[in-house]
Image: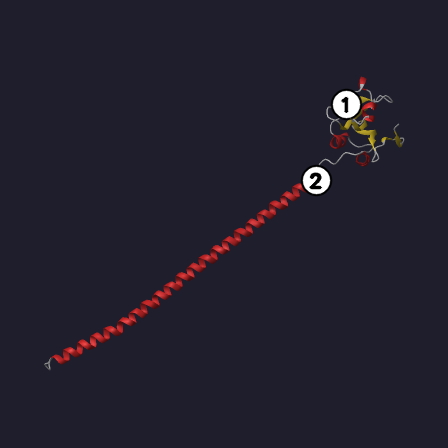
Amino acid sequence: MKKWLYPFAACSLIFILASCQEKPEQEAAANEESTVQKEDKDAAQNDSIENEDKNQSQNENDSEKENKKETEGQKTSSESEENNGTQELTAQLLKQELSLGLPTKEVRSLLGEPNQKVTSDKDGKTMWRYDKKTVDGYSYNAPGNRDSLDYESFINKDVQLIVFVGVEDNKVNSYSIYYYDEQGVPKNYRKNDQFEKTDTMQ
């Protein structure tokens, strides 16, 4: 080989060696950059998953709170209906709720509208008659609108609770309850401004 080619060959060798050394460095830098990008991507995915979990948890909590409110609302509504609903009408309840001087609007609230407004045979005053706990289709109209008792139907238990309420000046001045006690015995409870009495009916 000619001597003048030596410098050229040396330069070529140096260039090749430099290129080979630079390539791994570039690859390392590229790999490092790729790793950083991957880590950033993984971090972003983790943040997204955490946000989704957080949102889901928040939605579940909101749903639980809403369900709890609805349940409480239903419970409150149910309790209100139970407290304000119509209780089973019994003679004992009527003895507790009815009283002399009670406004007639309270009587209507307790018993509703009377089945018939009649006239007392004793003093000619107005009385309201209520027929409760009756069989289907039961109806009774007292002859002459008098305060007569449908005795036969009561004894046959076609009607098991009959209430007469004496009314004067929009207030209760007397009342009488025909009913069956817990042993199935027919009885009559009466109260006015002169006496209070319970009789067993034969």
Label 2 sits on a secondary structure element that is: helix
Whether pointer 1 and pointer 2 mark residues with C-beta atoms closer than 8 Å, the reply is no
- The picture places residue 75, in percent across and down from the top left corner, at 65, 44
Name the residue rendered at 50%, 56% in the picture: 54
| Disc marking residue 116 | 1
The amino acid sitting under disc 2 is Glu
Front-lying residue, 125 or 152? 152
- The picture places residue 146, in percent across and down from the top left corner, at 82, 20
Left or right for 173, reference 8: right
Front-lying residue, 64 or 202? 202
- The picture places residue 91, in percent across and down from the top left corner, at 81, 34
Image quarter of the C terminus: top right
Does the rendering let one see residue 66?
Answer: yes
Label 1 sits on a secondary structure element that is: strand
Question: Which image quadrant is residue 31 in?
Answer: bottom left
The amino acid sitting under disc 1 is Gln
Does the rendering let one see residue 149?
Answer: no
Image quarter of the N terminus: bottom left
Question: Which image quadrant is residue 109 in?
Answer: top right
| Disc marking residue 82 | 2
Name the residue rendered at 40%, 64% in the picture: 39
Name the residue rendered at 55%, 49% in the picture: 63
